Structure formats: structure tokens, C-alpha cells
Amino acid sequence: PKPKLKNSKSDSRLKHHLETNDNQNIEEVTSPLHKACEKGFELKVKVYLDYGDDINLIDDFDNTPLHYACTYNRINITKILLQSPKINVDIKCCQSRITPFLCAAYTKNIEMMTILLEHGANINACDSNGASVLFNLCKDENKEVYKYLLDHHISVKIQDKSGMTILHQIAVTNKKELAELIINYDRSIIDYQDIYGKTALHYCAINNYKEIMKMLIENNANIKIKDKKNNNVVDYLIDNDNYTEDIKQLIKSLEHSDLKDFNFHSNQLIKACKKGDYEWVKQCLEQLGDNIYYVDESGRIALHYACESGNIDIVKLLLEKGSCINIYDNKFFTPLYLASFNGYYDISKLLLERGASSNNIDYKTFKKIERLQENSNKKNISSSMEKFSDIEEYLKYRAKNNTLENTKTKSKEIQKQKVEDKSYLRLSSTPLISAILNGQNDIVEELIKNGTNINEKDEQDLNPFYYACSINNERAIHLLIEKKVEIENYCDPLKTSVMHFACKYGNVELAERIIDCYAMFQGNISQSSIYLSRSHSRELSFERYCGVNEFNKPNMFGVTPFHWACLYGKRDIIKLFKNGGINIFIEKDINGSNALHHVCSSGNTESVRLILKYIKLYNTKVILDQDSYININEINGNGDSALHISVRIGNEDIVKLLIDNGINQTILNSNNQTAKQYAESIKQHNKKILELLN
């Protein structure tokens, strides 16, 4: 029931207010009774109570008279209030949920707390955060108050909304004296975990509070517990460079009955490898011989991180201890892949010498294995593919044995098995492709020398040759051609072909080899001639083989290889298209730009001169056929002619070339501007361009 002021003679205005607002639970003004309790006016308090004032009446913050008395240390008032049988000693205010006992405790008034406890107050009352009085008094200067509360059997097992106990709070704030009190009072809470899975020891490790850490460890705190990030105490010590010799010795000295089986360095070896700390890696391996098989959440073992960090001495040490070389992580990266990706030639060479595989089964076969794997006991998947002559034989074996008998295995053997189970999986990008893309050509050469499959494709069905062309890695291209790589005009998902890249980078030799490849398929030349050295002539024509259309297919944006040759101003490539036919000049991309638009955008005067020369030759041949005539006045999708484009880039030589070849200067762009008007609107400061334009 709502607290009401009954028969109050003390303040008629307050009574009237309550009676006319009986739907409200909160007083909008502070009553005389509250004020009397605050000031310590004993006589007034007695009078108000005698006249019927509600002893549990709440103010606008839900505080009762008892809250006021306890907050302002009015012991005599508290005694008067507690004499009433109607008093609610544990009433809580609305928002913060603080009881009178909490008010007394916050003021550290032990006498007041004693009086309240004698009248039944709850010593374990918590505020709106679920925190008991211990949380709010977590300071070393409050040691005597702590002793008092512990002597009166306050619970230290209370966890607030974040799951913290008072021991967590002490560990976070580094209150050494209080830590000793709590641990001696109740050791059972030492390993309590909060909502993040952390114990008090975790927080000590994170903040490097060694004294409390030692205190907890000496009282058998469990160092094996992992939080929700899968980190134990030693993990945090290593991460923060706090794993000092004294802490190491303290942990070693523990006499936990099960500690000898605890691989608490599992993450530490990995982290030591990440940092490239040889001495620490060596120390971990000396203590834990089987730790090299530990697999973390990323599916990696220590060797992955050693190869990624580039410390060859650590790699050698791990290999000497028998680390698996061909394990794949969750992204299908092997140690060799990581070494080649980061350009560590010596490590890549070492791994290859020790038997690292740079070849993988094809993607479709991998998917077949993956599906079979899902239907079998994953812990017992056979990893020894060396028993079988080929992958099909292995698949048949897997199909017949998709339910394997469980066997009890030691922890070390299980970890090793988990590592080897991944040894047949396929990389989404091979070490060779990775080395090519990163320009690590020494590694490319070493991989090829050690027999890597130079035609192995990735999951996009693209081989190393495509990627070498995509960045114009000429040395890699030559190395692959020398080994007779399959030369095809591969296309990526956007239909960008190898020929696009040859045109983009002006790689004439590559363009000619692609042409030869098509010629071979047409039966016009022999296969062996593809790999012959190129002649010095750059005037080869497409017609001698099978026609330009095979080489000039557009990508998804309508951009042809010839467009790219024009856009990047690659004059020697443009020459290859000399006899490519009229269509290569007329064809437009999705923005409506043709070859002339693109070549003007390049700003390469000689390339523009060459294109205009070819256009003039074609137009001379077809002068009577208007349908085949190449119109140099075409406007692209942006509303610009070749002349507008040339004005924008500010190349006076190209502007003059276009004018000399008869381009129409009166053509309007999308803003209804002639080339001269456009030049003036963009404040073209090249006076010669303005003089050239009408």
C-alpha cells in the first residue's frame, strides 16, 4: 500500500497536498518530519510521530525519515524511529535502491550500523547495481569498517550486475590490505568469474598488481581458468610483458595436484612466436615438449606465427622439435604461404627443403572431402593421405569408412592428430600466387625450382600466370613462361582478362604470347612456337592468326583491352591493333566512351596522334559507306566530346591535333557549352588552348 500521512496535525498544507494527489507515491516537497530528522530535532520528531505522521513517508527521492537520520549521523533520531513497530528498516529508495543501512555504512558510522543490525537490518543489502556496502567502501582506509562487517558475517559472495565479487573490485583497484582480509575470510570466492569469465587473478595480471597476484596464487587461485576471450592469467602477463622471473618461479612452485597436466604455456608459445622472442620460445619448448601441436582459435600452431614474424631461428627450433609443416589454418594458410606472403625467402627455402608442400588438391575435390568430413567422426579423420596413390583412392576409403572407431588417445596425440587432420586441405591462395602478388620473385623462383605446380588454380579458377599478369610482374611472367605455364586469356569474375593487363601495362611481349596461344588453338602455329623468344618486331597483326575479336572482349564495364591500351597511352600496344578492324574504334564502354575518348583522357599526345592516324586511314577506305564511318565528334555518356576531354586535362598539343583533324568545335556538352565556353567555365589558364579554340 502507498504510504500516507494519517491525521497529521503538523502541516495542514502537506496533508492537503497528499489528500488531493493520492495517486502519487512520491512527495513533491520535503515533509517537516524529514527536515526534523535531518537537523536532529528530537522533540519535533516525537511530536510529528505522536500526531500520526507516517514513519515510512518518502520524499521526492524516495528517502524515508530513517534514510535522513542515518545519512546525517543522527543516532538519537534513529533510535526514536526504530522504536516504532511500523518502521521498515530495509526500505529502499526508488532509483539507487539504497537502504538506511547502506546510508549508515557510507558514512562509516559503526555505532549507527550496530543499532540498525540489532533491529533486523539486512547487512547484505545491495544498491541498484547489485553492489553491497563492501563495494562502495573499497579503500584501504576503510579497513576497520571491513573488519566490522566481516565480524558481523557479511557475505563476500555477492556478485554485482557485471558478475564481480568484492575480490574482483579489490583486484581492479589494487587494495592490498583489503585483499588479505577478504581472502582470509572466505577463500572460496577466489576463482569466481564475472560475466566476462575473468577471475580476480585475471585483473591482477592485466594490471600487473603483483602483491595481490602473489597473495591469490599462494592461496591456490586457479591459473588454468580461461575467460571468454580464451585467455588465462599467464596469457595476460605475456601480452603486457609482465611475466617476470619471480612470477614464473611462483607459478612453478605451486603444488596443485593437477598442475602437472596443465599446458598453461599453450598460448604463450604462440605469443612468443608472434613476438619473435627466441629465448622465450626456447624456454617454452624446454618446459613443454608437446606444445608445438597446440592449435589456437585461428587454427594456427606456433610455426604459423614464427613464419609470419620472420624469425628463422625460431622456425628451425620448431622444426627440430617435430612441428608439422603442412598444417592449414582456418583461412587455409600454411606456414609456407605466410612466409612467402611476407617475403621471407630464407624461411620459404628452409620449409621447402624440409618437405613443405606448395601444391594442393583442386577446389572441387576439397569440397568433396569437406562434405564427407561432416558425416564422420571429426576427431578420428584419417590424415595420412600418403597411404594412397591418389586423391580418388583416398575419397573411396573415406566413403567406406565414414564412421571410424573411437580410440582413447593421450592429450599430445589428440593435439597432433588435430594438426594433421588439416594437412590435405587446400589453400584459397597458393604460396606461389602469394609470392607473385607481393613481388617476392626470389621465393617464386625457389618454389618453381622445388617443383610447385605452376598451373594450380585458386578458388576463382585463376592460375599464377593470371596474377603475374595482373600486376605486370615481368620476372614472374618470364619464369612461368620458361617452365611452359599454361598461357590462356583467363578472366576474373569481372571479366577482366590477361589481355586487359597486357594492354594496361604496355607489355607487348605478353600480348603477343596470348595471341600466339589463340593461334595455336586455331591450328595456325605449333605449340612449341609459343615459348620461342620474341622477335624485336612490334608490328605483328592479329589477322595472321585468328582475328582481333578473340582478344578484345570487354569486361563487365564494357571496357575492352584496346580501351585500356588507349586509356593508359600504351602506343606499342595500340600498334598491335592497327589492322584490328573498324569496330575497335567504334565500340563503347558502359559510359559511352570510345577509343578516342579514352586516349584523349590519357594525355599521351603520341598515342592520340596514332589513333587519329588509324581513324583517318579507315575513314579514307570507307568514305562512301557512312555506316562504317568513324565519327570523331561522338559525345560520351557524360556529355563530353574528345575535345572537351582534352580541354579539361589541359593538353594543348592534343587540342591542336583534334582541331587539325577536323573535330567540330561547336559541339555542345551536357551543359550546353562549346569547348571554348567549357574552358572558360573551368578557368582554364592555358592561354594557348583558348587561342586555338574558336
Image (cartoon, grey):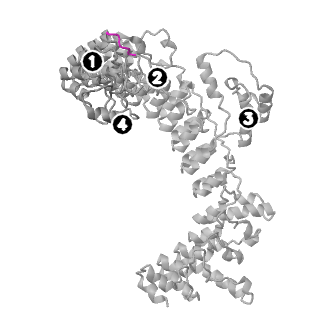
* Residue type (three-letter) at the residue carrying disc 2: Cys
Q: Which residue is mark 4?
A: 20
Q: Which residue is mark 1?
A: 81
Looking at marks 2 and 4 on the same chain, the residue that comes earlier in the sequence is marked by 4
Span shown in magenta: 152-156
Q: Nearer the viewer, mark 1 or mark 2?
A: 1
Where, quadrant-wise, is the N terminus in this rendering?
top left
In 3D space, how far apart are the residues under numbered discs 4 and 1 (Cα atoms)?
A: 27 Å
Q: Nearer the viewer, residue 86 or 392?
A: 86
Mark 3 residue element: helix
In 3D space, how far apart are the residues under numbered discs 1 and 3 (Cα atoms)?
A: 76 Å
Mark 4 residue element: helix
Looking at marks 1 and 2 on the same chain, the residue that comes earlier in the sequence is marked by 1
Give the numbered dot on residue 288: none
Q: Which residue is mark 2?
A: 284
Residue 486: x and y, percent? 71, 53
In 3D space, how far apart are the residues under numbered discs 1 and 2 (Cα atoms)?
A: 67 Å
Please say if the residues under marks 3 and 4 sit with CB atoms less than 8 Å apart: no
Dot 4: few (<14), some (14–19), or many (≥20) neighbours within 10 Å? few
Mark 1 residue element: helix
Q: Nearer the viewer, mark 2 or mark 4?
A: 4
Q: Nearer the viewer, residue 254 or 656?
A: 254
Please say if the residues under marks 2 and 4 sit with CB atoms less than 8 Å apart: no
Dot 3: few (<14), some (14–19), or many (≥20) neighbours within 10 Å? few
Give the numbered dot on residue 371: 3
Say which quarter of the image contains residue 173.
top left
